[in-house]
Image (spheres, rainbow, N blue to C red):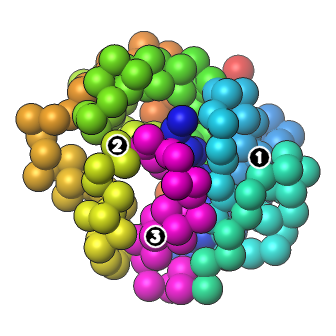
Amino acid sequence: MVTGIILAAGFSKRMGTEKLLLPVGGIPMIERVIQAVVDGGLEEIIFVYRRQEIKALADQYNLKTVYNKMAEEGQSTSVRAGLEAASQKSEGYLFFVGDQVFLTASVIHQLMTAFKQNPQAIVVPVYKEKRGNPVLFPQKLRRELMRIEGDQGGRMLIEKYRKSVIWVPIEIENAEMDVDTVEGYEAVFNREE
């Protein structure tokens, strides 16, 4: 079993407004991510949030929600909150960012397939030769993930265990796009189907 952990407790500092609630195709950005994750068929999904309006969207999908009261200390606190809430039976943790608006269930299936074949590996998607999200970490790295601090996810573990990384090329158009700035949000609309 793999646990999906959606990191949705950020502050959208570069955007200047709560980006996860901004509409893309008439649907809040974070809800598009939730839909992709739900369609991805994970047995357990944990949603780490800070704002009630964002939690309300997760509640519509009956996700297990975890409030991150330490969100101001950075993304690592959401990683820890998600791991603490995960099932003891979990063999891996697939971390999602809340602003990857063109993520699809197909991307998730490709990563899960690679992990089933290599259950001790870190599985990382590659979009146009650039690594991206979501990233799947095996259970054996849980302790190290719990020790990450500040505003970072598992990037340093990908570097540390580079020889244990499975790189999965993703050919789905725009699947890698995330939104950090107003310009990025406008670019999403220029690519919207």
Which residue carries the number 2 mark?
A: 138
Local crowd at mark 1 within 10 Å, few (<14), some, or many (≥20)? many
**Mark positioned earlier in the residue sequence (3 or 1):** 1
- Kindly indicate the quadrant of the structure image that contains residue 155: bottom left
Which residue carries the number 1 mark?
A: 31
Q: Nearer the viewer, mark 2 or mark 3?
A: 2
Q: CA distance from mark 1 to mark 2?
A: 26 Å
Q: Nearer the viewer, residue 1 or 107?
A: 1
Q: Residue furthest right?
A: 60
Q: Are marks 3 and 1 in contact (CB under 8 Å)?
A: no
Circle 3 SS class: helix
Q: Is residue 115 left or right of residue 162?
A: right
Magenta range: 70-95
The quarter in which the N terminus is drawn is top right
Q: Position of residue 59 (x, y in %)?
A: 86, 57
Which residue carries the number 3 mark?
A: 80
Q: CA distance from mark 3 to mark 1?
A: 22 Å
Above or below, comparing residue 23 to residue 11 in the picture: above
